[in-house]
């Protein structure tokens, strides 16, 4: 699981029929030293399936790979990253 910060929304012109009603977000992964800092490093953003309603600026927990599709079992959805939680506060020790 990764922690990421939402930087925007994605609009699709075409999608797989199993994804009707889905929201897609674009986010950047955060390293531990960036969690409580305003200064973020420029890293490669990635696209995430969202059912929780995260918005730009939110920190989120992201499941990837087979774990991202697990909440939909036995239905099959072609997703690789899923918002599993919206984080209110993160404490790094």
Image (cartoon, rainbow, N blue to C red):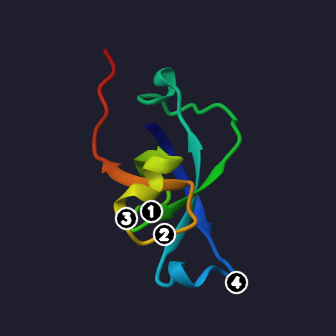
Q: 34 or 2, which lies in front?
A: 2
| Nearest-to-viewer mark from 3 and 1 | 3
CA–CA distance in space, label 1 to label 2: 26 Å
Q: Provide the residue designation for mark 1.
A: 55
Which residue: 33% across, 21% down?
92
Can you name the residue that lies furthest to the top here? 93
Q: Is residue 30 left or right of residue 71?
A: right
Q: Provide the residue designation for mark 4.
A: 14
Q: 45 or 40, which lies in front?
A: 45
| Nearest-to-viewer mark from 2 and 4 | 2
Q: Is residue 83 above or below residue 31?
A: below
Can you name the residue that lies furthest to the front here? 74
Element assignment for label 4: loop
Dot 2: few (<14), some (14–19), or many (≥20) neighbours within 10 Å? few
Q: Provide the residue designation for mark 3.
A: 73
Whichever of labels 1 and 4 marks the residue nearer the N terminus, that label is 4
Q: Provide the residue designation for mark 2.
A: 76
Element assignment for label 3: loop
The picture places residue 53, in percent across and down from the top left corner, at 38, 67
CA–CA distance in space, label 2 to label 4: 18 Å
CA–CA distance in space, label 1 to label 4: 22 Å
| Nearest-to-viewer mark from 1 and 4 | 4
Which residue: 65% across, 80% down?
15
């Amino acid at each position: 699981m990764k922690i990421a910060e939402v930087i925007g929304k994605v609009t699709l012109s075409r999608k797989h029929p199993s994804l009707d009603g889905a929201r897609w977000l674009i986010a950047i992964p955060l390293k531990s030293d960036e969690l409580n800092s305003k200064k973020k490093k420029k890293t490669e953003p990635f696209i995430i399936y969202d059912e929780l309603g995260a918005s730009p600026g939110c920190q989120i927990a992201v499941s990837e790979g087979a774990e991202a599709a697990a909440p939909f079992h036995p239905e099959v959805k072609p997703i690789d990253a899923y918002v599993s939680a919206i984080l209110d506060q993160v404490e790094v020790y």
